[in-house]
Image (tube, rainbow, N blue to C red):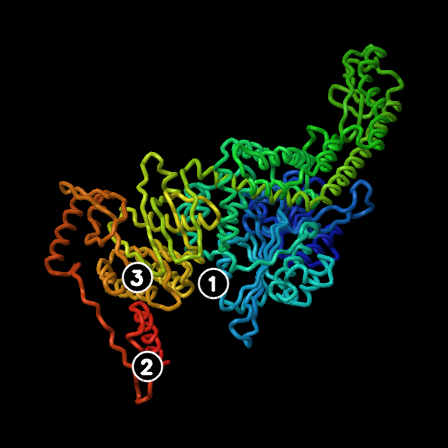
Amino acid sequence: MSTPDQSVREDDSSLTPFRRQYLQLKRRFNDAILLFRMGDFYETFDDDARILSAELDIVLTGRDIGKGGNRIPMAGVPHHSLDSHLAKLVKRGYRIAVCEQLTDPKTSKGLVERDVTRIVTPGTVIEPSMLDEKRNNFLVAVVPHLNRGHSGSEPSYGLAYVDVSTGEFAATEIRRDESGVLLREIERLAPVELLVPNEWGELQFFPEPPRDTRVSRLDDWKTDLTVTREALCHHFDVASLEGYGCEHLPLATRAAGAIVQYLGETRKVALGQLVELRIYQTGAYMLLDTATRRNLELSETSRSGSVRGSLVWVLDRTKTSNGGRLLRAWLNQPLLDLASLRERLDTVTEFVADASGRARLRDLLGRVRDLERLINRIGQGAATPRDLLALRASLSAIPQVVDALATGDREPAERRQEIARGLDECAEIVELVEAAIVEDPPTTLSDGGVIKAGFSSDLDDLRNSTEHARLWIENLETSERERTGIRGLRVGYNRVFGYYLEISNANRDLVPETYIRKQTLVNAERYVTPELKEYEAIVLNAKERIVETELALFRQTCAQIAAERGRVLRTAQAIARADVLASLAEVAVQNNFVRPELDEGPELRITGGRHPVVEETRRDVPFTPNDVALSTEDAQIILLTGPNMAGKSTFLRQVALIVLLAQIGSYVPADSARIGLVDRIFTRVGAQDDLNAGQSTFLVEMLETANLLTQSTRRSLLILDEVGRGTSTYDGLAIAQAIVEYIHNHPRLGARTLFATHYHELTDLANVLPRTRNFRMDVREEDGEVHFLHRVVPGAADRSYGIHVGRLAGLPRAVTRRAEEILRDLEKKGVRTTRKREPEIEVIQLSWLGEPNPALEELKALDVLAITPIEAVAKLFELQTKARDGS
């Protein structure tokens, strides 16, 4: 980041006092762009000016800083447009220190006192122009556990996050044996800024920061347990953190305390909004890794990064900003708790059953602004008069929202009534704003005219005292024209000379002797009179005092509102919940979704399932629904074969999306669905590479597959599409078969799995692995033409129809004809085969070097006649692993 020109020393006696002041501040904030307030502008100098000029496309000028003709680069922006310029700089990853004038230049003797009042970073902004209204703006702190002398079950990381625009503050601990969970949490939170200690350099936690995330480093002592614990206790004004649930969670304490200290340095006023710290466990939610979020396109499409075409695009019918944020939070953290899910589904069901009540509620919710961010801006002293009016209007709608929730066309509405009980209309706030703020206030406080007449007797007296003077000045032009006979006489005002009487040179002879000449123009003269200056002083002094009084009253009003912040936030949370559940109901009705049955059993059974996004984007084409039945005890693995473009990938994704929707408490696109809760969804779909990290497409595929195999459990859902296709045919086939066998046989696994492949040889596994089933995409051939029916049917495909797909894609006819010739030749030579093969048995050396092998001893002791075939396969896999490892 920028630093002052090293050729200019701070102790150089030739420097101006102004330059010395600037350099002293710049030394304190040398990792930030320093915006230095000078009158109506924020100026930058040296390298900061060059950056500002380049990034904001503004003119680079210069300023003399002392004797000898020293001149430095300079660039600035008007104070009234600061927010828009800050937004651009923050978006491009810069850290900005805002330096304000602390004393009035008009009354200051000598140099104006200045200091940095705020450091702007991506994770500390609250201005609406810098925020996405339906996304959280998370600042995340991660603290590693570096004591490698502890066992693997010890905590590895502390993670805390905060959204200073809403006040959400939470922390957790992630243990060493929870491999990959830290990365998944960071991916879920999508932080705009990540805080890490300097010691982080010792770790290889990820090869590079997440996209669009600024990494800010902290001195190691700021993450020390004693320091962070004291910081949290001081912030919450408590002697112990027991009440916050982190007294015995040292890493969570360190991460949360690091955030508190960082905000104390960058945006101290935001600390007042952190009134609660929520401790959570990642194990309470379904785990979704980076690849799965990308492949399922939950919040944006993988190809364009657009929201349109994603799952949230289909689901988000929310009417409020905080409702939109909550919906995204639910999508990123599907639940594992059956009772909570049934509670959500019960509420959605109530909304589905009451069409008119749902419509009325959604109409009312459209009148509610972003209560979370409004109350936080008010609490941080950043609110405008119009923010207060928006808060009043939103709270004024709450009584009607309560009525819409508590009553409906159809009973019962117990769940809705429960939400209604969480709403507080905050009548005192509504009455306060009603009494204090005018109906159409100016956008800023600098010119007054914000506070209503009758709210403050002192302000009313000030206003009344100037009324006579204003009227006198307003009537002066008319009265002086009549008195002097000068018809062209005009009364004017400017900031330099104040009020004046302007008379053209043609009427100079008629000017009264009592007029005092003030300014000469080309064709006129300007005059004042003692009486005019007297009334001017009354008006101008009173105006300044009125503005000061209004500002004090406005701040007082904001303070009174901020004192009720907890009530407003609880109402905001209830509003968001009602909004999301009503939105899910609206989608269910409009898109013909059904309520899923949820349990903790082994089955996943969907009848007439549909892909919610494909169906929405292609409403002009009827969607072909499909069934699926998986069970950890029966049909655990489905091997799906068939040509490209027949709908395999759509089918795979729709199963995963239906499960995910069910586990956020949503209805699902199907005729019926019975879902045994899934703890993790893993997907290995499509070709991806990471050239910056030196990772080929096939390496990325293997990394994702390895993660899937090591992290999944018996309750997981695995989606694999064309695994092994990125290498040679025999290598790929061998890898694909080994993966299927591993999923089927490993004692820890047995996960419900959809495995799509073009390796038709794998279909033989259904004869060997008892919980494996063959299904294919249905195809009809007529008169040499191939028709994809998009239906999933039992059985195995024996052709891929790749040449036909190439023809559909527009390959030259000569190419497809030649490809057909080559294919026929290869088939004659036997290169391509679909024959059934007898299962091959791998012979394993069970002893070596003359030493007894434990696996051999265990095999000898095994009662073969007393175990089931499935148990036998699992035992054989276990013995094979032991024999290979020599254990």
| Amino acid at dot 1 | Gly
The residue mark sitting in front, 2 or 3, is 2
**Residue drawn at x 15%, y 41% as measured from the top left:** 782
The answer to the question of whether label 2 and label 1 lie on touching residues, with beta carbons closer than 8 A, is no
**Mark 3 and mark 1 in contact (Cβ < 8 Å)?**
no
Alpha-carbon distance for marks 2 and 3? 26 Å
Name the quarter where the C terminus is drawn: bottom left
Q: Nearer the viewer, residue 230 or 851?
A: 851
Disc 1: which residue:
180
User: For mark 3, what is the residue?
Assistant: 771
Q: Is residue 567 above or below residue 843?
A: above
Label 2 belongs to which residue?
A: 861
Instruction: Please name the residue shown 78% across and 42% down the image.
Output: 105
For residue 875, which quarter of the picture? Answer: bottom left
Q: Say whether disc 2 or disc 3 marks the residue closer to the N-terminus.
A: 3
User: Image quadrant of residue 452?
Assistant: top right
Is 174 left or right of 593, judged from the image as shown?
Answer: right
Residue at the extreme bottom: 850
Q: Which residue corresponds to the image point at 89% horizontal and 17% vertical from the top-left?
A: 513
